[in-house]
Amino acid sequence: MRSAVANNKLDAIIVKVEKNGILSDGLITELKELRELALKEVDPLVVKVLRLTYEYLEEREAFDVQAQFEEDEEENEYPIEIEDLDNLLYLLNLLKNAEHKINREEIKDYRTALKLELY
C-alpha cells in the first residue's frame, strides 16, 4: 500500500485481527474498503489478493490457505503449518510493503493458493 490513508486502514485492520481474530465483526467490510483504496493506487495484485482474501473468509470462515512453503536440501517444497490467525496477519503485513520484491513474490503465492482453493 502506497498511500498513508491505505496504510492507516491496513494498520487498523491488523490491530483488529490481532485483538479479535479472523472472524472479527466488520472485518470483511474493512477488507473491501481497503480493496477500494488499492484500486485507487492501481495495484492489480493487491486488489486481487484482497478480494480473494475476503471471499475466502466469507466462504470458509477460516484462513487456512497453504501459501507458504519451505524447501529441503533436494529442493522439495513442503507447506509450512501455520495457524489461521498468523497466516492472515502475515499476508496483511506483506501488503504493508507490497512494492518490495520478495513481499510481492509471496503475495503472488497467496494469490495462486487462494485462486486454487476458491475456484
Image (cartoon, rainbow, N blue to C red):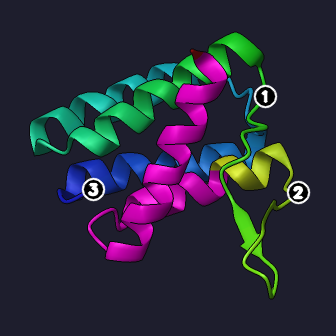
* Span colored in magenta: 89-118
Q: Evaluate whether residue 76 shows in this view.
A: yes
Q: Earlier in the sequence, mark 2 or mark 3?
A: 3
Quadrant showing the N terminus: bottom left
User: Which residue is at a point 66% across and 25% down the rendered structure image?
Assistant: 117
Residue 73 appears at what percent x and percent y? 80, 88
Which residue is labeled 1 in the image?
Answer: 62
Residue 63 appears at what percent x and percent y? 73, 35
**Mark drawn on residue 1:** 3
> Element under label 1?
loop
Classify mark 3: residues with Cα within 10 Å, few (<14), some (14-19) or many (20+).
many
Which residue is labeled 2 in the image?
Answer: 81
Residue 95 appears at what percent x and percent y? 41, 56
Mark toward the viewer: 2 or 1: 2
Residue 10 appears at what percent x and percent y? 42, 49
Query: What whole-number distance in Å separates the C-alpha atoms at marks 3 and 1?
Result: 24 Å
